Image: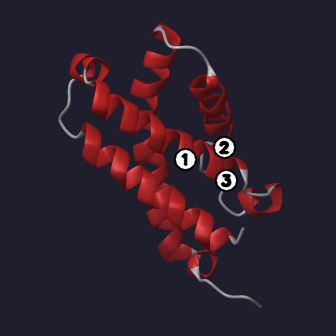
Amino acid sequence: MLLSALLGLIQNACESVLILVEQLPREELMRSRLTRAEVQRQLATLAASVAQIESEQRATMPELDWSGWALMRVQLAGPPGETLDEALWFASQSLVPATLLWLRVYRQSQPDLFRMSLA
């Protein structure tokens, strides 16, 4: 898949998670069946998209937490419980905002990464 398309998916999923958890206390996120399920779905989309980015492409964006997303992918595949709860909360409060911030920086400094082209 084109890098620009993957980065677009990642950015959209990040924005969706931030909207879903905006001003939402941890306990409320964990209790809310629908919001929690959607946050988990968006995080799974993010983790799967990040996993498709090749190492040479990752090297052009070193500040992104590639290993954090790899670990998140493992955590999301695990069983329900405290480990998954912690992963959801950490991702929504730390990993997602940092990823979105760096994507915005890269969009400014490396716009070619975000351009769709078949060449």
Find residue 67 and report its image quarter: top right
Q: What residue type is labelled 3?
A: Pro
Q: In this view, does 24 lie to the left or right of 72?
A: left
Asked if one can make out residue 95 in the rendered structure from this viewpoint, the answer is: no
Q: Residue 62 carries which label?
A: 3
**Measured along the vertical axis of the image, is residue 44 above or below residue 60?**
above
Q: Residue 66 carries which label?
A: 2
Find residue 59 and report its image quarter: bottom right
The local crowd at label 2, few if under 14, some if 14 to 19, many if 20 or more residues have their Cα within 10 Å, is some
Nearer-the-camera pick, 79 or 7:
79
For the point 82% across and 61% down, which residue is it? 56
Q: Which mark is residue 45?
A: 1
**Measured along the vertical axis of the image, is residue 15 above or below residue 30?**
below
For the point 59% across and 76% down, which residue is it? 110
The answer to whether marks 2 and 3 mark residues whose Cβ atoms lie closer than 8 Å is: no
For the residue labelled by badge 2, is the local secondary structure a helix, a strand or a loop?
A: helix
**Measured along the vertical axis of the image, is residue 48 above or below residue 112?**
above
Nearest-to-viewer mark from 3 and 1: 1
Asked if one can make out residue 47 in the rendered structure from this viewpoint, the answer is: yes
Q: Is residue 67 left or right of residue 45?
A: right
Q: From this viewpoint, which residue is outermost toward the front?
A: 34
